[in-house]
Image: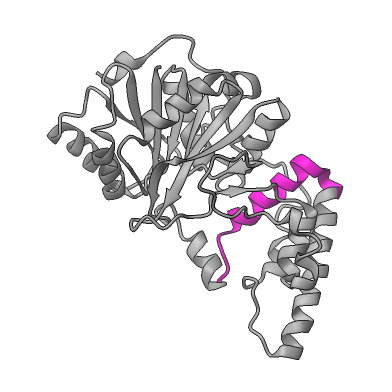
Amino acid sequence: MLLAIVIVNYRTPKLVIDCLYSLQSEIEVGSHAVIVVDNASGDNSVEQIQQAITDNNWSQWVQILPSPVNGGFSAGNNLGIKAVAADAYLLLNSDTIVRDGAINLLLKVMVNHPEAGLISPRLEWPDATPQISCFRYRSPISEFIGAAKTDLITQPLKSYEVHIPVSDSPIEPEWTSFACVLIRREVIEQIGLMDEGYFMYFEDIDFCRRARNAGWQILHFPEARIVHLRGGSGSVKADLIARKRPKPYLYASRSRYFATFYGKTGLWFTNLLWLTGRTISFLRELVGNKKPHTCEYEEQDIWTNWVNPMKLPLLPGRDNMTELPSKILLSKTK
């Protein structure tokens, strides 16, 4: 099977190099290719990564592809996908370390499960503690649950909770983290590339939802394991944990997702449900003297782009090409 591994870099050259070291024993030269897309880092990322490729004689299976603009996570991955024709594409975060045999396991699962369009491994910390990486769709009700944050509401609506507990057996979630995911070429041919209207976040749930709507299964296979260090691509997750105000693109992506799958009216309804839930949690905070669980300014930030949620980011030289290459181009990595 011809496999293209796409790694998007934005000012994380050392993480990328560590990831490449973990890949070198997993690669079959001639059948596997790695595309490192530099998302206009503006530092010396390209030079550092290229030097590592040269020093380690990786040029037969790794190429670095500089992007003229930082179009975000979707755009960077799309650029890598369009650079190489393959039977399958493994999207791999720069802040990951591949465990021995993980890629071969994922490829075997893809061959044995033709109904699975996307396959994800278990994500774990360096000490092998598993991370939650499988989810149910984010919905208006899940937004209400998350804002209210009380068992009186969560328990009766548990089937709408987004997070799915870690499983030791294969499961079929509604969507899975794109920190590492194997995507069958036929899925992209059928539903198109990732939506570049998402700068970062919500692009994975969007793609999985479109794939499932087209009849494909999402399969999580925990026997394959990938270390996910988290936080290499930005500060948003750290901000959410600290309840600080995250970057505006998080809320812009949220608005785009809900407008895409629930309509513009559905986005407004979702925000009203969130505010209702937040009112409940706020009252509980007043009575119980508890700290807020929401981020700073979240009450106003959820309305980001609500007037025009489908507006594309303003990026120079945006490439609207959606077709995959028709020929095998693995020779480009040699």
Front-most of residues 67 and 99: 99
Camera sees residue 224: yes
Q: State which region is magenta.
A: 244-265
Residue at 26% x, 43% y is 17
Instruction: Give the percent coordinates (x, y) of residue 83.
Output: 42, 22
The quadrant of the rendering that contains the N terminus is top left
**Residue 44 as seen in the image, left or right of residue 90:** left
The quadrant of the rendering that contains the C terminus is top left
Instruction: Give the percent coordinates (x, y) of residue 282.
Output: 75, 80
Vertical position of residue 36 compared to residue 59: above or below: below
Vertical position of residue 236 compared to residue 114: above or below: below
Q: How many marks?
A: 0
Residue at 54% x, 45% y is 177
Front-most of residues 182 and 35: 182
**Residue 172 as seen in the image, left or right of residue 144:** left
Front-most of residues 37 and 112: 112
Q: Furthest-left residue in view?
A: 55
Task: Give the dominant element type of the magenta stretch: helix, strand or loop.
Answer: helix
Image quarter of residue 85 = top left
- Quick check: is 324 in the magenta stretch? no
